[in-house]
């Protein structure tokens, strides 16, 4: 077995080129690894900790750029947050309704979760004025999906393009409760409304067309909010005003980050990897079901519950993959894993069809166009559909120059594709991985050795 050569070159504009040279024969991936903390849970722990009374202790927080954006926004509104590290972060909450008016624009960086969830909190803080923005990607992502339901509750929000794009200005109000029927299954929309409902007198309900991740519901309950859930209709009701009390949160490893190693282990012949301590909340495990459908050999070991979230170690061994169709209600349960699933499909026999995933077009990049273009540059056969992709597997990949389009999940998906491409693959703007996975390159090197 010989190792892949992995090098990082920092460019004049501080972007990174990740250069991966696959050995001419015999690469197999081996070892036990841990992935960083779950991004969705990390945001929510910081936010609820800031809004609660008393201290919240967070173990295993993701130290990626997105949670850092959340922490700095809430610090700017008076929450005391200790230095961010994975061991223990302490958040001294200021109590619901006590956010201070920040003296500057709140910057959510690249993070849609920070901006959309925070809007629900800001809009329901009477008598305070807030301005929020983000980086170039976030300023182009649709905010009307949260602005509209908040307006239905009486919120006052202004922004470009009919109040649909950041920067946004918010005049906090006492809101009125509502029942919002969301046209899309989105945890960001659901969570935004539930957070607005925290301070709103009465019952605020969200109904979504399919179940999206339920971390907000679990954590709101753990912090003391009154929530009722009707699973048959995918509805959640929060009764406000709530009282939140600081808690101890243990953040499991992020299944969205584990997905890169699950696919790598499945497609690189002779591999066996164990990804330890991964969150396997059923609203997030669509990736495991899709890979099982494709014939991947993945076992869940040591299943347990940690601080209200199911957790397991995932063992993957390489196997022959076959195509499948992924569409319908499973999509929100694997939406962030579709770029890496597309890489798996390139190595599967037959044509894989991914549909009902138009949401991918409004993520950190247009993930349908970008994945199709970049994989095709490497020799894959990917056809764009309006709401997904059609991927015919079996054509060998050839290393070439590809680009992340500053999207973290694209950067990492292309790095895994490079492990099975002949020759040298250069991934431009690979530093984007640090949004959700700061040590990605180190683990890549580790599993290749
Ligand atoms: C997230 C929800 C999902 C997901 C995003 C994180 C969350 O977005 O894609 O990465 O933490 O609530 P949508 O709610 O827009 O589907």
Image (spheres, rainbow, N blue to C red):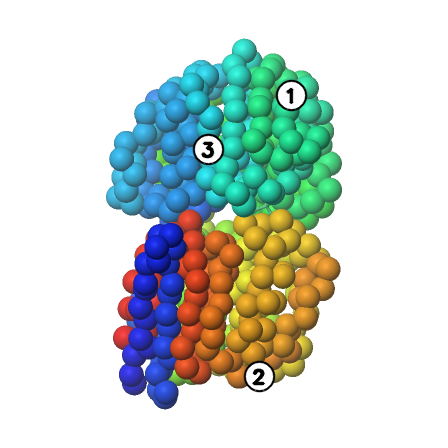
Element marked by disc 2: loop
Find residue 379 and report its horizontal and vertical position in percent: 56, 79
Front-most of residues 137 and 238:
137
Q: Please say if the residues under marks 2 and 1 sit with CB atoms less than 8 Å apart.
A: no
Instruction: Give the residue furthest to the top.
Output: 127
Disc with the residue nearer the chain's start (3 vs 1): 3
Can you tell which mark lies on residue 302? none
Q: Quadrant of residue 98?
A: top left
> Where, quadrant-wise, is the C terminus in this rendering?
bottom left
Find residue 175 and report its horizontal and vertical position in percent: 63, 18
Can residue 261 be seen from the camera position used here?
Answer: yes
2 vs 1, front mark: 2
Find residue 402 and report its horizontal and vertical position in percent: 49, 67
Residue 358 versus residue 317 in the image, above or below: above
Q: What is the spatial separation of the Cα atoms under label 3 and label 2, in whole angstroms?
A: 43 Å
> Is 363 on the left-hand or right-hand side of 425?
right
Q: Give the residue displayed 55% in from the left and 13% down from the top.
A: 126
Disc 3 under 8 Å from ligand 1? The reply is no
Element marked by disc 3: strand
Instruction: Give the residue furthest to the bottom.
Output: 25
Few, some or many residues within 10 Å of mark 3 (<14, 14–19, 20+): some
Few, some or many residues within 10 Å of mark 2 (<14, 14–19, 20+): some
Can residue 33 be seen from the camera position used here?
Answer: no
Residue at which label 3 appears: 107
Residue at which label 2 appears: 395
Disc with the residue nearer the chain's start (2 vs 1): 1
Q: Give the residue displayed 34% in from the left and 45% down from the top.
A: 63
Residue at which label 1 appears: 155
Front-most of residues 58 and 260:
260
Q: Quadrant of residue 25?
A: bottom left
Disc with the residue nearer the chain's start (3 vs 2): 3
């Amino acid at each position: 077995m010989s190792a892949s050569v992995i090098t990082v070159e920092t460019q004049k504009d501080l972007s990174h080129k990740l250069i991966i040279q696959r050995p001419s024969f015999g690469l197999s991936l081996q070892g036990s690894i841990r992935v960083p903390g779950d991004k969705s849970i990390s945001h929510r722990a910081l936010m609820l900790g800031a809004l609660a009374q008393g201290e919240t202790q967070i173990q295993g927080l993701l130290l990626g750029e997105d949670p850092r954006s959340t922490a700095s926004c809430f610090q700017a509104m008076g929450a005391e947050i200790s230095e961010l590290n994975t061991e223990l972060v302490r958040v001294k909450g200021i109590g619901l309704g006590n956010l201070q008016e920040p003296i500057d624009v709140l910057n959510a960086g690249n993070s849609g979760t920070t901006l959309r969830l925070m809007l629900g909190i800001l809009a329901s803080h009477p008598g305070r004025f807030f301005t929020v923005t983000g980086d170039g990607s976030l300023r182009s992502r649709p905010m009307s999906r949260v602005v509209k339901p908040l307006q239905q509750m009486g919120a006052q929000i202004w922004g470009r393009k009919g109040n649909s794009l950041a920067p946004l200005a918010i005049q906090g109000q006492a809101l009125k409760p509502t029942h919002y029927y969301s046209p899309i299954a989105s945890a960001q929309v659901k969570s935004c409304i539930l957070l607005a409902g925290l301070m709103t007198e009465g019952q605020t309900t969200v109904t979504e067309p399919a179940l999206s991740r339920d971390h907000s519901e679990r954590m709101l309950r753990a912090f003391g909010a009154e929530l009722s859930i009707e699973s048959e209709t995918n509805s959640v009701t929060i009764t406000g005003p709530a009282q939140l009390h600081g808690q101890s949160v243990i953040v499991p490893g992020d299944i969205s980050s584990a997905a890169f190693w699950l696919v790598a282990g499945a497609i690189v012949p002779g591999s066996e990897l164990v990804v330890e301590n991964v969150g396997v909340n059923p609203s997030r495990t669509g990736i495991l079901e899709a890979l099982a459908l494709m014939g991947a050999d993945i076992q869940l070991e040591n299943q347990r519950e940690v601080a209200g979230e199911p957790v397991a170690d995932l063992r993957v061994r390489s196997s022959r993959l076959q195509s499948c169709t992924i569409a319908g209600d499973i999509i929100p349960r694997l939406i962030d894993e579709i770029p890496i699933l597309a890489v798996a499909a390139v190595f599967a026999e037959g044509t894989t069809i991914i549909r009902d995933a138009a949401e991918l077009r409004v993520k950190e990049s247009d993930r349908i166009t970008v994945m199709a273009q970049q994989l095709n540059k490497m020799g894959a056969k990917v056809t764009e559909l309006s709401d997904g992709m059609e991927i015919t597997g079996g054509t060998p990949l050839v290393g070439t120059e590809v680009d992340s389009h500053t999207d973290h999940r694209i950067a990492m998906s292309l790095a895994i594709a490079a492990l099975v491409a002949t020759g040298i693959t250069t991934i431009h703007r690979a530093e984007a991985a640090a949004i959700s996975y700061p040590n990605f390159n180190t683990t890549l090197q580790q599993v290749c050795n």
